[in-house]
Structures are given as structure tokens and as C-alpha cells.
Image (cartoon, helix red, strand yellow):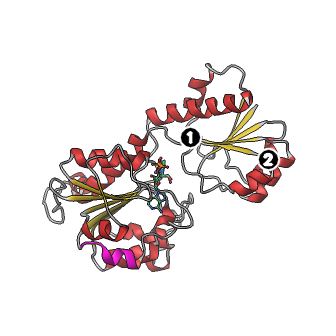
Amino acid sequence: KIIFYDAKQYDIDSFEKQRKNYPDIESIYLEADLTEDTARLAEGCEGVCAFVSSTITGSVLRRLHEHGVKLLLMRCAGYNNVDIKAADKYGITVLRVPGYSPEAVAEHAMALALAVTRRIHKGYIKVRENNFSLNGLMGLDFHGKTAGIIGTGRIGAAMCRICHGFGMRVIAYDVYQNPDLDFVKYYPLSEVLRESDLISLHCPLTESSYHLINTETISLMKENVVFVNTSRGALVNTEDLIKGIRSRKFHGVGLDVYEEETENVFENRQEDILESSVTARLLSFPNVIVTSHQGFFTEEALAAISRTTLENACAFERG
Ligand code: NAD
């Protein structure tokens, strides 16, 4: 018996479609994130399934343990929101979906890069207002430019292939080199930042990558660079990014993830933008596009997430 925590309820259909192939799994869907408070609803369930929107701390895991939960199924790739040491301590096995559709996220990264580089967001609004002037819409070509990919695992590798297909020179930084990417040259991080016209982040959030992009690393980047983050918000020091945007360092910035990914961070934008949260302030810049952590959100990726999550539950059951 598995309880699915999901405040947004966006992937229930996808799970229900797959579930006919797993008749032994009984499921309950809950319109809430997994918290210390909602953990008590897992009473009687062997497994709980949660998404990246839940912060699964030691106390949440202790509660789950008290209610007899043995398995935590994360239906996402990143697991920086789970206290893995505590899960170990309470004997809870954590399984995740490491590679559902890397192309889904990489294509979203390129969509953000293109949209912000070609000013698609501004052009769209102008045309809707019956304004066909090209003022403020000057773009840049990607063809013949250099793409710098930071992290060349599943998603980063897909992004390398997309950039290669655009006729870009592709360079990368990773702690391990991906042998499948023979068209990619690896350099130290500082070189990648110095040489790239498009920089896209695809490494996980760890202690060592926290605020990887900060005033110092931004200062190494080229003037007029395009910067995209579809990985994790805290890879970037938002305050420093805003300083960089203000100093006109960037041609454009596309963010699918940001430091405060709470439901109302943009709703609560103050009249005085300077009083707003640092994330909300990003919206005040015309060369910044922010999306709602939707890189994974394609039909194909959701089907793969559901399938692998249910497979993970079966694999756990089989021992
Ligand atoms: P992956 O594990 O396949 O690849 C990560 C790569 O980053 C590896 O090659 C690893 O060696 C490298 N790496 C680790 N630490 C690094 C560092 N400090 N500097 C440079 N490289 C480093 O992961 P993936 O499936 O490609 O996913 C990458 C990230 O994308 C995930 O950690 C997750 O945070 C994010 N993600 C976002 C979405 C979304 O919807 N926006 C969806 C899925 C995943």
C-alpha cells in the first residue's frame, strides 16, 4: 500500500494509467506535500511516494518510521530535499527515478535559452498588443557560438547534443568526463565560464555546488552571455545574479528553478519591487524568463516517472 503525496496533483492520471500493470499495488492520493504533520496519514502504508516539492527532513522521516513506513519513493531525479542519513538511521529505503526523460529537461533548457535570446516573450506580448515594431527585440545567433555545459550526466549530455545540433562549439565542466560525448571538450570551470556564449547548469545541488554561480564566477563570464538554470535554484546565489543582471552582464537569463520555490513567492510580490523577495525581484527584468520548475513536465517524462516509481515499489517488495 502506497500513499502518494502531491500538493499539485499533476501526475495522478499518469500513475493511474500505469497502475493497471501493477494490480498488487494499492494507492492513496493525497492533495498535500509530505510534512511532519501530513506524515501521520501514512499510517498503515508500507511506502510513501513524494515529489521534489516536499522537504523530507529527519523529523519527517522519524514520523514516517513511527508509522511503520519502510520505503520512500521519490518521483524525481534530484534528492537534495531528502535527509538521506536520517533515512538510513530510521531504516527507510529511498528509491528515486534517476533518468526518466533527460531530453524533456534539456529541451526546456534550450527553449528558455532560445526564448530569452530571441526575445520571444517580449515579441509575443507586443504582437498581442498589436505592436509590430522590432524595438527591443534584437537577438543573437547561437550558430557558430560556444555553449558551456556544467554537468554532463544524463540531462547535460542531452543538452550537449542539442547545442551541437545547433552548430555550436560545445565545451563542458564536470567532475567526471562523459565518454559518449566525443564532440565535447572538457575544461576547468573557470575556462568554461570565460569562453561560453551560452552557459547551462546541469549538475546536482550538493555542498560543493551550492552557490556555484556567484559574483566571482559571474565576473569570469563574457559580456552579453546567455545563462540558463534548469537544475536546482541554490546552485545560483540569486542576490549575486541580480547584481550581474543589473550591471548588464547578461543578454538573457532563463530560470526554471530558483532559490525560493514556494507556491506564493511571485504572488506575494510587493508593490515596491525592492521590498520583494529576491526571487520575485527577478521578474522585474525584461531579459529574464522564469518558469515553474516544469522542465520534466512532458507526457513522455511523466509516463516514465510513473512506470519507474511503480517498478521501484515492486523491486523493493521483491527485496
Ligand atoms: P546526472 O546524475 O545524470 O548528472 C549529473 C552530472 O553532474 C554528473 O555527470 C556529475 O558528475 C556532475 N556533477 C556532480 N557534481 C558536480 C559539480 N560540482 N560540478 C560539475 N558537475 C558536477 O543527473 P541528471 O539526471 O542529468 O540531472 C541533473 C540535475 O537536473 C538533477 O540533479 C536535478 O537537480 C535537475 N533536474 C531538474 C529537473 C527540472 O524539471 N527542471 C528535472 C530533473 C532533474
Label 1 SS:
loop
In the visual, does 61 lie left or right of 155?
right
Residue 257: x %, y % from top left: 46, 58
Residue 126: quarter of image: bottom left
Earlier-in-chain disc, 1 versus 2? 2
Magenta highlight range? 216-222
In the visual, does 15 lie left or right of 48?
left
Q: Which residue is mark 2?
A: 91
Q: Mark 2: which amino acid?
A: Gly
Residue 241: x %, y % from top left: 40, 73
Q: Mark 1: which amino acid?
A: Val
Identity of the residue drawn at 79% across and 54% down: 89
Identity of the residue drawn at 35% across and 74% down: 218
Q: Characterize the local packing of mark 2: few (<14), some (14-19) or many (20 or more) Cα atoms within 10 angstroms.
A: some
Task: Please state which of residues 279 and 194 is positioned toward the viewer in this rendering.
Answer: 194
Task: Please state which of residues 64 and 144 is positioned toward the viewer in this rendering.
Answer: 144
Residue 247 - label: none
Q: Is residue 109 visible?
A: yes
Is 220 covered by the magenta stretch? yes
> Magenta span: helix, strand or loop, mainly?
helix
Contact check, label 1 and label 2, Cβ < 8 Å: no
Residue 85: quarter of image: bottom right
